[in-house]
Amino acid sequence: MNKFDNFKGSVLLWLRKFFLPGRSFLDFALLPWKILLVLLAVFSLVVLGRGGYGYCMAWQSYPAAPATVELRRNVVYVQRDWQNLKMDIATPKLGHGPFPAVVCIHGGAWKSGNKKEMLPCLYALAQQGCVAVSIDYRLAPNHHFLDQIDDCKAAVRFLRTHARELNIDPLHIGAVGSSAGGHLALLLGTTDTKELPISGDDIKVSSAVEVVVNLAGPTDLSKDLPADSELSAEKFIGKTRLQNPESFEKASPINYLTAGDAPTMIIHGTRDQIVPYEQATEFLEACKKIGVECQLLAIKNGGHGGGGNIDEWNSSMVQMEKFLLSHLKLLPSSALGL
């Protein structure tokens, strides 16, 4: 057994502890997006067997970028309300490009979190041939919908506007998000400027994305949510459901679905107590009715950020990466095997 095998074993043991049922509600409520980091970490470590060692360690200690990745931090992508919103950009050192790009959107109930939490995600994607970026966006309760999706769209437009200098293929941009970030990623995949007006000088530049991965993000805010999630949604919207139900409908990705929207993969635990599993199944059915490609990976007995069968989480990692890379043209569609 070599050094890589020993490390892989220790990581899998650590993952089992992380995913064990019985963790507190607060653990899952505050840290759900970390699952996305774990998924991509194990992709790189276990499935692909290259670059994963540094990446998994990055999740725990945030070291410098791997030797094959160039990291640019705190790049201003837009100014809003006299605030410079920034992104971190991870670029492959191997290959000539232009590379596809992925926007990684952190979770945190629309009111907390920051881009540095997605740094390991950037490393993993960059090692697979993507320019990966993680963004800060305006947060509740000081900022409400539409501010957050406006920021996400501005980030995509920034990548397209600066595609040449960033060595990006502007036709191949995807979005990955967890929890609240998954909700925003879905809005990127289902809306355009007519449906959700955006601000900025470059509004003629498209903010469309080619593929979306949503980890346990809500798809329909017009439906009643568990109490804590309802409170977060109200802070995000800026009103209660009784005060303005129309705003909750307007913030719901499922209401924007049309033929031709971005292919989407959803990973969701069947016992999620924060974002009900039905949010995922209803979005899947809505996609089927209009012919939008959608894959749902259900984690049996999984919660919002853990629990359930570790093997199912591992399997979802493999399928998620293949789905993402295939639609970004880094893998042939035949490689999906779904």
Image: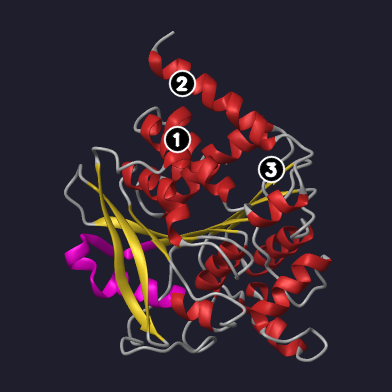
Residue 158 is inside the magenta segment: yes
The numbered mark, 2 or 3, whose residue comes first in the sequence reads 2
Residue at image coords 38%, 87%: 82
Which residue position holds label 1?
Answer: 56
- Determine whether the residue tagged by mark 1 lies in a helix, strand or loop: helix
Rendered location of residue 338, percent (x, y)? 57, 41
Q: Are marks 2 and 3 in contact (CB under 8 Å)?
A: no
User: Could you say which quadrant of the image residue 5 lies in?
Assistant: top left
Residue at image coords 66%, 76%: 252
Q: Is residue 326 visible?
A: no
Rendered location of residue 18, percent (x, y)? 64, 36
Which residue position holds label 3?
Answer: 306
User: Could you say which quadrant of the image residue 243 lies in?
Assistant: bottom right
**Mark 1 surroundings: few (<14), some (14-19) or many (≥20) residues within 10 A:** many
Q: Which residue is more in the foreground, 308 or 96?
A: 308
Which residue position holds label 2?
Answer: 7
Q: Are marks 1 and 2 in contact (CB under 8 Å)?
A: yes
Q: What amino acid does circle 2 point to?
A: Phe
The numbered mark, 1 or 3, whose residue comes first in the sequence reads 1
Rendered location of residue 197, percent (x, y)? 49, 89
**Mark 2 surroundings: few (<14), some (14-19) or many (≥20) residues within 10 A:** some
Is residue 158 depicted above or below 281 in this figure? Answer: below
Rendered location of residue 211, percent (x, y)? 47, 60
Q: Which residue is more in the foreground, 305 or 337?
A: 305
Q: Is residue 72 visible?
A: yes
Residue 219 is inside the magenta segment: no
Q: What amino acid does circle 3 point to?
A: Gly
Which stretch is magenta? 152-173
Q: Is residue 213 left or right of residue 89?
A: right
